[in-house]
Amino acid sequence: MNSFFPDLTRFEAAIVDLDGTMVDTLGDFAVSLNRMLADLSLPPVAAAAIGNMVGKGSEHLILSALAHVMPSDETAGAPALHARPEALFDRAWERYQHHYLAINGQHSAVYPGVVEGLEALRSRGLRLACLTNKPTSFARPLLAAKGLDGFFEFAFGGDAFTRKKPDPLPLLKTCEALGTVPARTLMIGDSSNDAKAARAAGCPVLLVTYGYNHGEPVRGVDADGFVDSLAALDHAAV
């Protein structure tokens, strides 16, 4: 399916992803990760490469960045410690948190059409929750900084539950919080993580075409439909 204008009367609620769906946060990731790498005396990673690492939580992002810039073995002249990204993770995580919290939202922007889309959902009586793999301590301040927090009854980060998307647990727990059943709860995201979690949870899923999908074409993902802008929801069937 190439496009999808959902009948919003089918739904009682919507769960909306954050990075790559509502906010282009690639700049925040790039600044924070490269400052972290500099603290570890490691070379920087290009923003384009970072975009392919986003979406599976900060732990995965940090380990991916470390693996990207670190030699794979001692033949490249690196000490044994530097041959294993996991060995640097604790220090890297501490420095990443420090830098991300310092610049959170300063190098990011709300995508065009997001506010219009959220207003359309809310005007039709849908209850809204934000569900992201981003840590809650990063997600909630970002929503507030971008003026999006007022749309959501709940904002759950990747540390809110015992498992992250693409596991269905976060969606099921978010449906519980909203008091809705999955079949009447629309998942809106930008990647296969969102789609796989929605499919497993039993939620219909709509993907935007402009976000982060691990370097793969988003239209190849198993989803109910795709939109180039959340503003399309303002024209959805009522």
Image (cartoon, grey):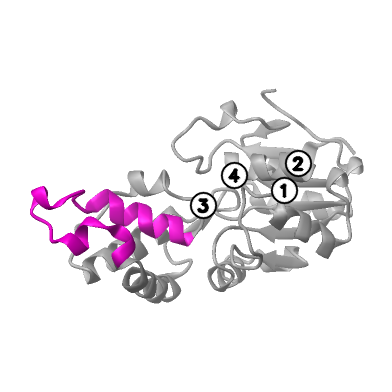
Among the two numbered marks 3 and 2 on one chain, the one whose residue lies closer to the N terminus? 3
Specify the segment rendered in magenta.
58-87
Task: Give the percent coordinates (x, y) of residue 195.
Answer: 66, 40
Amino acid type assigned to the residue bearing label 4 in the image: Asn
State the residue at coordinates (59%, 39%): 192
Which residue matches tag 1?
117
Which residue matches tag 2?
233
State the residue at coordinates (62%, 59%): 163
Task: Give the percent coordinates (x, y) of residue 207.
Answer: 65, 38
Image quadrant holding the C terminus, namely: top right
Rate crowding at label 1 as few (under 14), some (14 to 19) or many (20 or more) other CA atoms within 10 Å: many
Q: Nearer the viewer, mark 4 or mark 1?
A: 4
Among the two numbered marks 3 and 4 on one chain, the one whose residue lies closer to the N terminus? 3
Residue 72: within the magenta? yes
Give the CA distance from mark 1 to mark 3.
Answer: 25 Å
Is residue 160 left or right of 176 when viewed as pictured? left
Which residue matches tag 3?
56
Rate crowding at label 4 as few (under 14), some (14 to 19) or many (20 or more) other CA atoms within 10 Å: many
Asked if disc 1 and disc 3 are in contact, CB closer than 8 Å, the reply is no
Q: Is residue 191 visible?
A: no
Amino acid type assigned to the residue bearing label 3 in the image: Lys
Among the two numbered marks 4 and 1 on one chain, the one whose residue lies closer to the N terminus? 1
Give the CA distance from mark 3 to mark 4.
Answer: 8 Å
Asked if disc 3 and disc 4 are in contact, CB closer than 8 Å, the reply is yes
Q: Nearer the viewer, mark 1 or mark 3?
A: 3
Which residue matches tag 4?
193
Task: Give the percent coordinates (x, y) of residue 134.
Answer: 54, 61
Asked which secondary structure carries label 4, the reply is helix
